[in-house]
Amino acid sequence: MAKHTGILDLSNELLRIVLEHIEADPDKLVNIDRRAYLSQESFRPPPAPTRDQVEDIGAFRRTCKRFSELGIPHQFARVTTRFSAKGFRRLEGIAEQAHLAKHVKKFSYMVPYFYVEGSSIVFPCSSYTAYLYRVGREQVRELLPDLQARLGSLDISNFLRKINDQKEIVRSEEDLRVLKKAISAFTSLQHVQILRVQDREDSALLSFIRQHDDLTQLVELRWPPACSHSTKTLGEALLASRSPCSRFSSPMLSPQSAIILAEHLPQSISTLFERLTCLELHFDDGTDLDNRMLELSGLFKLVFFAAKNMQALHLGFPSHRPLSLPLESIYHEVRWEKLVAFGVQGWRLDADEIINLARRHRERLKGLRLRDVLLKEGSMWKDVLAFLRNDMLRLDWVSLRRIGYTKKFDEQWAVTGAEMPDDPPGGASESDDESDNMSYDDGRGSVVESINGTAHDTSSSEGDEASIFDDEDISDDEHGPAAHEMDFPPLNSPDTPASAPWCNCNGQSYPESTDDLGDDGVFVSNAQRKLWEKWVVRRCPEHSQR
């Protein structure tokens, strides 16, 4: 009589299904052609697993060697590391275990603000990575009495430790060494992202310094040097390893740091651009953004002409301070043969600019995202919509969240006259009263996304394994979870407009022409844009769910 050993008799295929019920299989990363790609895979790390999930996967892997191997992809398909001594030690440990490293498909690099003396950031041409930090113990100690009194229970010694930690990492180039080692070991790497991270202590110190201008001569927390350094070292690691990685994203890219990077590009960088299939960037609210981006026009031209394999592309700018440059000053009339998803956010444009770019990609484009796009005087949204509906051969959906007209926007801005925080990259809720909300620790030391696109880390372990929560429930409510989606569509899905069955209302609620869309050239309500999105892709505005 055959002896049965219970679960050990199950095939590997069935065991993988069991694991998927414990935790969503990270092997199945969101594809670039899905509507949730940008919000889930590009601008946010994966959600932190629950303690039960971690313990269950751990217990499963400890059962036997076979189970251990089956569970590895569920733990190591995504690796998140913080710029810190502890983070690099952990990353190096993973890289040294080939049976783990070979499963890594997505690498999230969480970079904190750099501590620098107010006027002492130096980018020497001879040694780009050798930032000169002159923040010493004595200088920081001048802050201690006020800081300790005002910051309450925060331990000032932690600031000193972080300063010394950052200085030593940059001086020794330990980050570059470990990144090169890790990227070389990640032989299945597909996607790299750089995220800004901030813990409660840094946030409190940053707020305190901003309220006391005289303190900026002693110490500052600054993002541009951190962004520049991390982007450059990661780029060097990708080049040195000849990594297969083809996707790059950053939700808070500094325009100033990008300009500095453009001045120090190695000749071999074009090999990275040629491999690009997806590029998603959201620029933070730098000063004089138009001129900063114009300085980067040449770099964009170099990248876009080299990136012949581009399939998904998104460039975003602050919704409260939209870019005013002509579209082609950035895109240079490039036509990508393989482009299926395209998006822009925060831009003042003419209708013809949108139409011309869409026309160049009419044969393949399935998703078009025009969030926070404002049309200039003389342009009408109904002209854009008519072209998209009648001429875009394969368009499955269009996202028009918070579109409008420049005149109305400027009038409202003149009335409010106040600085407004930017929406998070990928879009936030349209509820004005949510714009200042900040999310922090969930109680397990995990990183939670703030409304301005910065991850906040409160864990004592510096967040090396922490991640940002992800709300991706399907909804079109302007205040619901769908407001956080980047809205890139699925391809060949039975739910797409092209294949969804038509309703039986005989089109009675369907606008017959652009004149019936209610476009007054002044203001676009949320209800209007929802109807327009469905009208463009010929989906019934009354009976379709999206």
Image: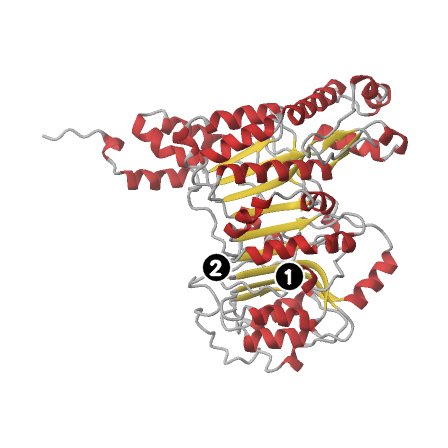
The tag on residue 490 is 2
The crowding category of the residue bearing disc 1, from other C-alpha atoms within 10 Å (few below 14, some 14 to 19, many at least 20), is some
Residue depth check, mark 2 versus mark 1: number of the one nearer the observer: 1
Residue 546 visible, this orientation: no
Q: Report how far apart the C-alphas of labels 2 and 1 lie in the structure.
A: 25 Å
Check the image and name the residue furthest to the right: 214
Q: Residue at x 42, y 63 (%)?
A: 492
Residue drawn at (80%, 25%) of the image: 151
Q: Residue at x 35, y 29 (%)?
A: 68
Give the side of residue 250 with respect to residue 414, left or right: left
Check the picture and name the quadrant holding the C terminus: bottom right
Amino acid type at mark 1? Tyr
What is the number of the mark on residue 331? 1
Q: Position of residue 247 (x, y in %)?
A: 53, 48
Pick whichever, 301 or 371, lies toward us: 301
Q: Number of marks in the image?
A: 2
**Label 2 is placed on what type of residue?**
Pro
Residue 433, how many percent across, how many down? 75, 50
- Of the 4 image quadrants, the one containing the N terminus is top left
**SS assignment at label 1:** helix
Q: Secondary structure at mark 2?
A: loop
The residue lying at 44 percent from left, 41 percent from top is 26
Residues under numbered marks 2 and 1 in contact, where contact means CB atoms less than 8 Å apart: no
Vertical comparison of 98 with 486: above or below: above
Earlier in the chain: of badge 2 and badge 1, it is 1
* Left or right: where 304 falls relative to 136: left
Task: Provide residue 71's location: percent of width, then percent of height.
Answer: 38, 33
Asked if residue 240 shows in the view, the reply is yes
